Amino acid sequence: MNAFDLTGRLAVVTGAKRGIGFAVAEALAAAGADVVGVSATLDPASSEIGDRVRGLGREFSGYRVDFADRAAVTGFADTLAAADRPVDILVNNAGTIRRAPAAEHPLDWFDEVLEVDLTSTFVLSQVLGRRMLATGYGRIVFTASLLSFQGGINVPGYAAAKSGVAGLIRALSNEWAGRGVTVNGIAPGYIATDNTQALQDDPDRSKAILERIPAGRWGTAADIAGAAVFLASEAAGYVSGAILPVDGGWLGR
């Protein structure tokens, strides 16, 4: 048996329209899973990720959900939880970031980042987790961050949210791992996506970042995909409450 085979599983991937979410959704489909892709701007009827998943011979359903709207997130979660087919894998990847020095950081930015990056992930995990617990099987994977361990610069809301994600991973694992539902996270390093474009475009910050990464390069969204497949698979059946850094060696520096 291939312990990484996800054939017959249904995976929900948030933030699936682009970046890390896109790469993860495609990788899960390549491993055999059918995919529900979700994004704040995804066209449910026509999307590149939908085409990729179907091209791999898997089923795809698309949803547009504003993760800053708690009622919308709850409604979406309730819809999935009530469907005939249970969700086996939940990848809480959708997120946002706002950059401003802490002394001038607008409170509405802080609130928005916490709602999208932390609260929405709890809502989805709680609602879909109930059915996973009822069936005795589930895999929940969060996109954490290097800032689950560090403080960052000019991103107090993001650092607070991703630190909260780390705590949430451990809290859910403590309650659910013994009931067949593993809960883990991936901490991407500096990945070349839209969220890090401002850093990539800043010559001084980009140079400083690259000089600290032992691998000597920015990561790509595809670098995260293998870790997601692992944590979603039977190969990680005894892994729970863990946060796996995929950072080119950053945290070990």
Image (tube, rainbow, N blue to C red):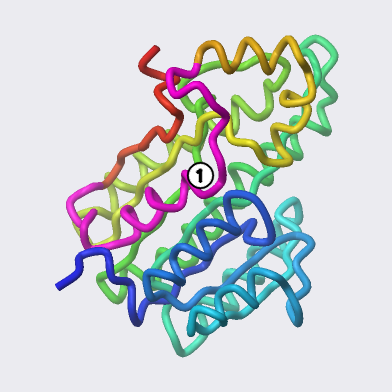
Q: Quadrant of residue 194?
A: top right
User: In the image, is 27 to the left or to the right of 194?
Assistant: left
User: In the image, is 214 to the left or to the right of 1?
Assistant: right
User: In the image, is 70 to the left or to the right of 249?
Assistant: right
Figure disc tally: 1
Front residue (pair 53, 62): 53
Residue at 75% from the left image edge and 51% from the top image edge: 68
Front residue (pair 88, 17): 17
Residue closest to the far left = 1
Front residue (pair 46, 164): 46
Give the percent coordinates (x, y) of residue 134.
Answer: 31, 74
Q: In the structure shown, which secondary structural element does the residue marked by tag 1 occupy? A: strand
Q: Quadrant of residue 97?
A: top right
Q: Assess whether residue 252 is covered by the magenta stretch.
A: no
Q: Work out whether 25 lies above or below 222.
A: below
Mark 1 = which residue?
143
Q: Which residues are magenta?
A: 213-239
Give the percent coordinates (x, y) of residue 87.
Answer: 43, 74
Dot 1, crowdedness within 10 Å: few (<14), some or many (≥20)?
A: many
Q: What's the residue type where badge 1 is placed?
A: Thr
Q: Work out whether 69 lies above or below 158.
A: below
Residue at 49% from the left image edge and 18% from the top image edge: 213
Residue at 70% from the left image edge and 61% from the top image edge: 39
